[in-house]
Structures are given as C-alpha cells and as structure tokens.
Amino acid sequence: MEGRVALVTGGGRGIGRAIAVRLAQEGAKVAISYRSNAAAAGETAELVRKAGAGCETFKGDVASSEDVEALMKGVGGAFGPVEILVNNAGMTRDNILLRMKDDEFEEVLATNLKGTYLCTRAVLRGMVRARWGRIVNISSVVGLLGNAGQANYAASKAGMIGFTKSVAREVAGRGITANAVAPGYVETELTGALPENVKERILGQVPVGRFGEPEEIAEVVAFLAGERAAYVTGQTIAVDGGMVMQ
Ligand code: NDP
C-alpha cells in the first residue's frame, strides 16, 4: 500500500492506534481522527511518523455530518482523497435493556453505526472515481453473539455488518472492497473498566485462553486493506481467539 492514503477514525488510542501504526509500516500515509483526546492522538501521530509515514490528526465527532465533511476536507487537503478507510471509532454505554435510557441507545448507535455510514458515504465517490478502495469496519463479536447489558452496542455492531455487506455489493464492480473485522475481547480503555469477575467470565469463552492484543486486530485490518485482499469482500472476520467459530 505504498503511498496510499488511509484514514483511521478513532485512531488516537487502543485498537485504532495499532491499526494506524500497522498501515504506516505498510507504507500508507495515515490520517487519524479523534473526538476529544488530542494528547493521545498526538502520541499516535509520533508513532506513525516513527514508522516512516506521514501523519495528520483531525478532531471531530464521526456522528456529525458537518464534522465528517470537515474531516474529509482536511484529509483531502493534506494527503488527497481517502483510499483506505477504517471505521474504528466506537463507544459503549452499557445498561440492561429494562433500565436503558434513550440517550444511551442513541449515542452508541450514532457513533458506531451512523459514524460508519457518514464516513463511508463521504469517501465512496473518490474511490469509485479511482476505481480502487478499501473499507474496513471494526465491528465486534458482540454484534455476532449479542451480550447481556449491551443491546445498544450489539445492535450497532450487527448493523455495521449488514451495512458492510450492502456497500460491498454496491461497489464490488469498481475495485472497492468492504469488509468487517469482529474483534473479541482486547484490553484497551474501552474494556479496562470491566469488573474482574466479568473479565474472567469472558476469558472462559475464549478457546485460545487469553485476551487479544490491538496489534493482532491491526494485522487482519492490514491484510484486508492491502492489494492482496482484492477478492475478499462483504466478509466479517472474527479475530477473537476462537470465541465465534462460523
Ligand atoms: P477506545 O475507547 O480505546 O478508543 C476509541 C477511539 O474512538 C478513541 O480514539 C476515541 O477518541 C474515538 N471515538 C469515540 N467516539 C468517537 C466519536 N463519536 N467521534 C470520533 N471519534 C470517536 O476503544 P478501542 O480501541 O477498544 O475500540 C476501537 C474499536 O474496536 C471500537 O469500534 C470498538 O467498538 C471495537 N471493539 C473493541 C473491542 C475491545 O475489546 N476493546 C472488542 C470489539 C470491538 P478520543 O481518544 O478522542 O476519545
């Protein structure tokens, strides 16, 4: 992917940071977006530059169409049209359904699903014109299995899978692929707050017997984002130590 322009949303921390660095190692120029943690985004940018690639950071909410428009203008100005889009920005607001508030449902759907829709729609025209593009959406095993206390998050992540398949069908003839990666449990700030007993219960469901590393997710994303994955589209690849065996 030498010289390709990649955008990783939510690239400031966690899995997104590992993806940004991995794409840089493959030779891509990497733009990262973040919502509020500028210091973390700056650290990622340093790591990307150390890996030998250009990097720019952009602040904005992926759930806002104005912010996404500004993001794409910024990336376009710095590097040119986005050729590799990784929809990674995501969040949780867990609650059991009986107690779930409308804003908990809406905020999670807005970031995870609407954000994916807005960013993908914004880059698609450029990809169609170039007759080349790679879209990788970071879903979750929770979107495949469901999870008590995460009906909002599971709906958003399952929605991303249906969205990915539909986009894949729309643009398959134009040299563009769209795939989803469904990570299992990876230790980041997103999962760091879970109580120990919940972590142990999850670990009991992982055949490999350990949690995943952000770099292990990034490895599969890098494959899907590259030239060699041209014949893989509309798929959801679980990277989860065997939690989901399809
Ligand atoms: P983190 O919470 O560590 O990082 C989330 C990143 O997304 C941050 O950079 C954050 O920005 C950004 N972000 C969040 N909301 C928005 C928004 N509305 N607009 C723009 N950026 C936003 O998460 P992880 O690295 O753990 O997760 C990354 C992705 O992987 C998510 O989609 C998550 O659902 C998915 N995933 C994670 C798993 C895990 O075990 N960790 C398992 C399965 C899926 P800022 O730094 O400014 O806050």
Image (cartoon, helix red, strand yellow):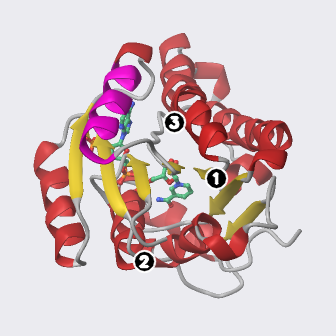
Residue type, label 2:
Glu
Which element type, helix, strand or loop, lies under badge 2? Answer: loop
The picture places residue 160, in percent across and down from the top left corner, at: 69, 39
Compare marks 3 and 1 and give the one earlier in the sequence: 3
The picture places residue 170, in percent across and down from the top left corner, at: 82, 36
Q: How many marks?
A: 3
Residue, disc 1 = 132
Residue type, label 1:
Trp
Residue 21, image quadrant: bottom left
- Residue 75 belongs to the span the image colors magenta: yes
The picture places residue 232, in percent across and down from the top left corner, at: 79, 65
Q: Nearer the viewer, residue 66 or 11?
A: 66
User: Is 229 on the left or on the right of 29, as rendered?
Assistant: right
**Residue 26 badge:** 2
Q: Is residue 171 above or below residue 152?
A: below
Residue type, label 3:
Asp
Tell me whether the residue at label 2 lies in contact with that at label 3, contact meaning CB atoms closer than 8 angstroms: no
Residue at the location (32% across, 39% down)? 75
How much space separates mark 1 and mark 2, taking CA atoms?
A: 17 Å
**Quadrant that contains the C terminus:** bottom right
Q: Is mark 1 within 8 Å of ligand 1?
A: no
Q: Tell me if mark 2 has few (under 14), some (14-19) or many (20+) residues whose alpha carbon lies within 10 angstroms of its own.
A: some
User: Is 107 on the left or on the right of 100, as rendered?
Assistant: left
Q: Is residue 200 above or below residue 178?
A: below
Q: Nearer the viewer, mark 2 or mark 3?
A: 2
Compare marks 2 and 3 and give the one earlier in the sequence: 2
Which element type, helix, strand or loop, lies under badge 1? Answer: loop
Q: Tell me if mark 1 has few (under 14), some (14-19) or many (20+) residues whose alpha carbon lies within 10 angstroms of its own.
A: many
